[in-house]
Image (tube, rainbow, N blue to C red):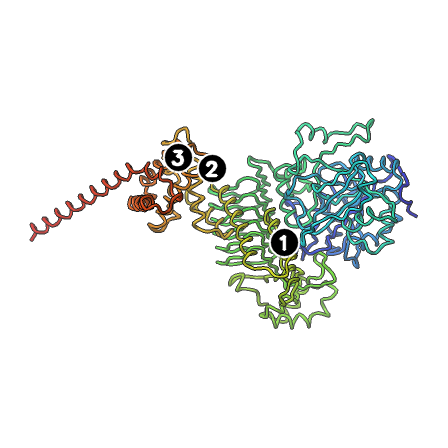
Amino acid sequence: MAPGKGSGHEKTDNELLLAIVIADSFDDLFQPLSLNKPRCLLPLCNVPMIEYTLELLASSGVNETLVVCKSHAESVKAYIKQSKWARTHSPMKVKTKVVQQSCTLGEALREIDDTLFISDFILCTGLVISNMNLSSILDMHLANAKRDKDQIMTMVLQEATSGHRITDKSDESVYVIDPSSNKLLSVDSFPSLPMADHLDIPLGIITDSPEVEIRADLIDTNVYICSPAVLELFRDNFDYQTMRSDFIHFISISTLDESTFYAHILTGTSSLSTVPAETRQRSLGSRDQSEPFAVSHSGYAAAVIDTSAYDAISRDLIGRWAYPLCPDSNPVDETVYSYNRGAVYKAEPVFLGRESRVEHHVVLGFNSQVSDFARVTDSVLGKDCGIGERSVVRGSYMFEGAKVGKGSVVERSILGERVTILDNVFIEHGCIIGDDVVIGPDVRIPEFTRIARWRPQVEDSDFSDGEGVGMSDDDDDENNDALSSVVGNANNRSSAANTATSPASKAAVDGTAHETFDTQALGISGVGYVWSNATTGDDEEDDFDEQDEVDGTRTWLRQLRTIGSSVRDIAIANAEISKRLSATHIVDEEASIAVENASEESFEHELRLTIRRSFEENLDIDIASLEINNLRMSLKGKLDDMRRILIQETLRFADLDNLPGSVKHMFSRWGGLIKKTLSNNLEQVMVIDIVERFCALDESLDESMRGRLFVLSLRFMYEFDIVEDLAIIYWYNKASEKSSSGSGAGEISQDLVQKIATFIEWLEESSEEGDDEEEEDDSDDDEEDEDSD
């Protein structure tokens, strides 16, 4: 019989420290990547995610861990059996328990035999990435239990700056804490859509405490130090489905249950918050046993709750924000990475073309290959991955065996195992492509698209990774007939959203009919199916009403949470859903304008960074042009905006202390890049407009510099054939006409127009001399013709 709460049990050196790892996520956010394997076995920096969790527990002194799994349970058991945790000299014993009938965290915990856990234990998900040591937090938990007999849990929270990329943008939480003891008084967890306009904090929590902190800057790490009473409470109450928003929230505000919670807050040695390096080094050392409760609060901890968090945590590990947790300290002893300049990690062997560019924050897995003129940046390539010539992979993750052909672009997306991207394919940002899919050639995949090798099937009663999508091995025989009819109707896209063909049923399909893939979307050689919104559990109702508008925006937010989405995108989504909830009628044009404005700002920001990097790294003109054009197409930017930003950044790079030489160098070096954006004389006039606006309005320029920069810019743009003399003269005449007529006042700086008057005179004289020379040449030719006659 498990002891009741507040047992005050103190762990001794000879007592086993136990842990429960929930290896199933009970949602479908990683589909279709989780069709063939559970999420906990998906690679993060080429290491299965569960390895980070098990390494955390082992390094914290855990003796035995119970891995609780549902979807792909056999895969989890097989992985544990062949891993280092199954060896006789393993520091930690790992067992597995299958909870096949569970659909939520609460149901899974109710199936655990609580008689096994007679002392305090660690509970976490199989997706926790952390460099902290839990033993000191456990000591603090036990010390609190002596003072507070009602304590049942210590919740490990990570402090983060507002709007940090690791935060869960779909489910925000506000914590009410007693700062003197770190007692957790209340947790209010609510979804971002619909956006809440108030918090429900019981008045007694505020009035009964001399001091409280209300904090919204804390992240749930999914790590909890629990007393045995936690399992008992889950077993007795069938309403607790989740840990934070159900269990902790309802018990903390309950007047019937006196159980208490405490918080341990990590201040972080990561990108989440800044701590001096010497503090980080001390936190990695041994703790002074004479002061068991002087706990260091530094550390990094986060959970891979969705693809946005997957991207953020990967970047943190590559950028060494979670040191010593980084790719070159690989917890899996199969591969050894070397750390190179720019946070580039290479396994041995890798094959890089002499003209390839592998830039900052890249992990290259064993036997990966990057061909000539290909570029990889901010990405992870798994084992046996390949990038073809002239291709670009930016901010993306390629699992084992994925290939990208020639001239293709992959933007901020995830490619599953053995995915093949053929030549001249553009994968826009936010796409998730499942295992064994083939795309191309010569196609463009829209943003936030999900593609799988198998047709999807939605089961409303089950959203676990891999479950409710396709059929299990045991169901193959009885479903062969159904699969035959599904394949016969493969061209019907509406029925495709509600049918399934799983890897386990492939043989049955191949034996009955030939599969018809979505070649219209994926290319003539495409293999796979595009999943609709209905596939991911979104509403399929065709009726248009207010609730459908809300659900449609919920789908939008769900897509924004995909890899690479910005905090501003989420804010736009929040503002939009708030409008839709507060009014019964909404003008669709307003929503479109809000989205368009956010997209334009994102495009401008990314483009400026790309142009500055091209200048700083002195890229070849053709490569720089390819990069900025790929970025424009991926973010659906306008050519006029791209031209404007390019010219502005060129002028900003000029050295004001050496203006003539610097301006001449910038236009001689990068004038060709500007010329690639011009196709006619009218666009040359637009270039002069952009230069004039910059010189007139840019705050970085002193008044004495504005005229000089304008004159020098026109001079060298003319000298290096960026704009012709006719375009400059035409612009000057139009600007002068506006000045004399009084129209356009304030649109063009007349001071700048006057500054170039002398230069215009020189251009006109040069033009007249050129015309005279041409006339003389023509007359000479006529005389020669007469003589010949």
Q: Is residue 385 left or right of residue 158?
A: left
Residue 706 badge: 3
Disc on res. 402: none
- Secondary element at image label 2: loop
CA–CA distance in space, label 2 to label 1: 36 Å
Q: Which residue sits furthest right? A: 1
Whichever of labels 3 and 2 marks the residue nearer the N terminus, that label is 2
Q: Position of residue 182 (x, y in %)?
A: 79, 37
Task: Name the one closer to the observer, 242 or 518.
Answer: 242
Looking at the rendered structure, the secondary structure element under dot 3 is: helix
Query: Residue 174 location in percent, x, y?
Result: 73, 44
> Percent x, y for residue 528?
59, 61
Q: Is residue 575 left or right of residue 621?
A: right
- At 39% from the left and 35% from the top, the residue drawn is 706
Residue 557 — which label? 1
What's the amino acid at mark 1? Leu
Image location (x, y in percent) of residue 109: 82, 52
Amino acid of disc 3: Arg
> Which is closer to the viewer, label 1 or label 3?
3
Amino acid tagged 2: Glu
Of 29 and 326, which appears nearest the observer?
29
